[in-house]
Amino acid sequence: MPDIDNRSIEIVVQNNTRGDLEIQDADIASPGTVWITGKNAEKGTTLKTYATMRIGAKTEKKKGDVNFAVHFSGLGPVPITINAVNNIKGATRPDCAGNSAVHANIETISNQDENHLIYRVVLTSNVSTGITYKTRIRSKV
């Protein structure tokens, strides 16, 4: 965990979809922000179905901002994007843009210290109701 005046944010990504997901890209957007050792998002890393992955970043400078985005591919026509921000203006909840095949629920794991936040993003498959209707046309002869 970073020093008390530094900031960090960690995301536990839980893949409850019907397929594996792969990190297509990961970006750190704030100067002075680095991946937390062992929690970095590396392009090409696979998140298997029903597995979890912990991704996190921290500031290396006092009172800096943490801001990163991770893009997953594997299901749906466009990437699933998780954005995480913890800035000096106040703790910000992460957001996730799913697609037609995947949606996300975001849960707070720890926000007792606004400088060090942990969230869970649960990815699940969008499924239809599975109900199909068959119509039979009968003709009189």
Image (cartoon, rainbow, N blue to C red):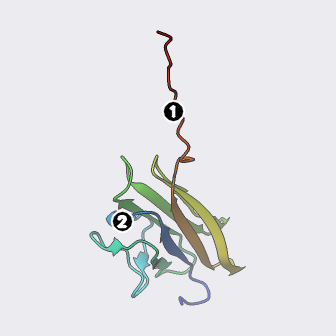
Residue linked to disc 1: 134
Number of marks in the rendered image? 2
In the rendered image, residue 66, in percent from the top left (x then y), is placed at 51, 71
Check disc 2 and give the amino acid type.
Ala
Q: Amino acid at mark 1?
A: Lys
Which residue is the extreme one toward the top? 141
Q: Nearer the viewer, mark 2 or mark 1?
A: 1
Tell me the tag on residue 106. none
Whether residues under marks 2 and 1 lie with C-beta atoms below 8 angstroms apart, the answer is no
Whether residue 55 is situated above or below residue 77 in the rendered picture: below
Tell me residue 92's x, y (percent): 63, 64
Percent from the top left, x then y, of residue 30? 45, 66
Packing grade of label 1 (10 A; few <14, some 14-19, many >=20) is few
Choose the circle earlier in sequence order: 2 or 1: 2
Mark number, residue 26: 2
- Horizontal side of 3 relative to 34 (left or right) equals right
At numbered mark 1, what does the secondary structure look like: helix, strand or loop? loop
How far apart are the two marked residues, 2 and 1, measured between alpha carbons? Answer: 46 Å
| Image coordinates for residue 137, horizontal then vertical, percent | 50, 20
Q: Nearer the viewer, residue 46 or 71?
A: 46
Residue shown at 56% from the left, 90% from the top: 3
Is 97 on the left-hand or right-hand side of 34? right
Instruction: Note whether 127 is above or below 66 in the view shown.
Output: above
Depth check: give the residue in front, 74 or 67.
74
Q: Is residue 61 left or right of residue 87?
A: left
Number of residues whose C-alpha sits closer than 10 Å to that of mark 2, classed few (under 14), some (14–19) or many (20 or more) = some
The residue depicted at 62 percent of the width and 88 percent of the height is: 4
Where's the N terminus, which quadrant? bottom right
Given residues 136 and 40, the one toward you in this image is 136
